[in-house]
């Protein structure tokens, strides 16, 4: 990521993080250099996720301003912005959508959605992505 690579004292920061965390290293990390590369990748992932959340929340803000409030507004706004809407396969409250790498909070928030309030508020974070979610349909539990 460009922003991370522009940090002038990046190596010093990685060294400091290594020193702080080296007692927690697992055997899979064989050298300080390997650890620092993994740490750099993780920091890049966090930055990308932060940017994705910011973009998703900007999209969500526009979505919430649309009237009347209805779930298909997400498709209209996405189309206007050249984005693709994807619909998950039905999922349970306990397991969440199999095709997404998301935490428990995704299903928890999804199951709170109603036709009167079809949006989850701010973006829901996955491992590598941020999602704006809407209720498409509800099936009997």
Image: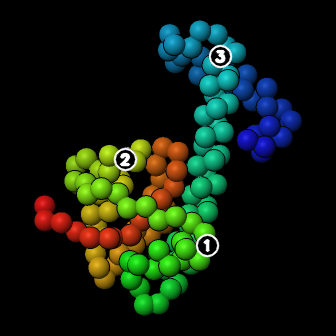
Q: Which residue is mark 3?
A: 34
Q: Which residue is mark 2?
A: 99
Residue at 67% across / 23% down in the picture? Answer: 37
Does residue 25 sit above or below 101 in this rendering?
A: above
Q: Which residue is mark 1?
A: 81
Does residue 44 sit above or below 19 in this rendering?
A: below
The quadrant of the picture occupied by the C terminus is bottom left
* First in sequence: mark 3 vs mark 1: 3
Nearer to us in this view, 89 or 131: 89
Secondary structure of the residue carrying tag 2 is loop
Labels 1 and 2 touching (C-beta < 8 A): no
Residue at 22% across / 49% down in the picture? Answer: 94
Left or right of residue 75, residue 19 in this image: right
Residue 112 location, quadrant = bottom left
**Real-space Cα separation, disc 2 to disc 3, in angstroms:** 31 Å
Residue at 31% across / 82% down in the picture? Answer: 116
Residue 130 on image: x %, y %? 51, 55
Does residue 107 sit above or below 134 in this rendering?
A: above
Q: Which mark, residue 70?
A: none
Residue 132 on image: x %, y %? 47, 64
Residue 23 on image: x %, y %? 55, 15
């Amino acid at each position: 990521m460009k922003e991370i690579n522009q940090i002038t004292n990046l190596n010093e920061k990685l060294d400091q993080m290594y020193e702080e965390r080296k007692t927690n290293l697992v055997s899979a990390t064989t050298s300080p250099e390997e650890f620092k590369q993994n740490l750099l990748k993780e920091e890049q992932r966090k930055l990308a996720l932060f940017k994705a959340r910011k973009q998703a929340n900007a999209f969500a803000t526009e979505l919430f301003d649309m009237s009347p409030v209805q779930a298909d507004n997400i498709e209209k706004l996405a189309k206007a912005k050249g984005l693709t809407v994807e619909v998950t396969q039905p999922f349970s409250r306990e397991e969440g959508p199999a095709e997404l790498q998301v935490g428990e909070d995704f299903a928890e928030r999804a199951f709170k959605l109603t036709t009167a309030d079809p949006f989850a508020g701010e973006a829901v974070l996955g491992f590598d992505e941020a999602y704006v979610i809407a209720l498409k349909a509800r099936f009997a539990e």
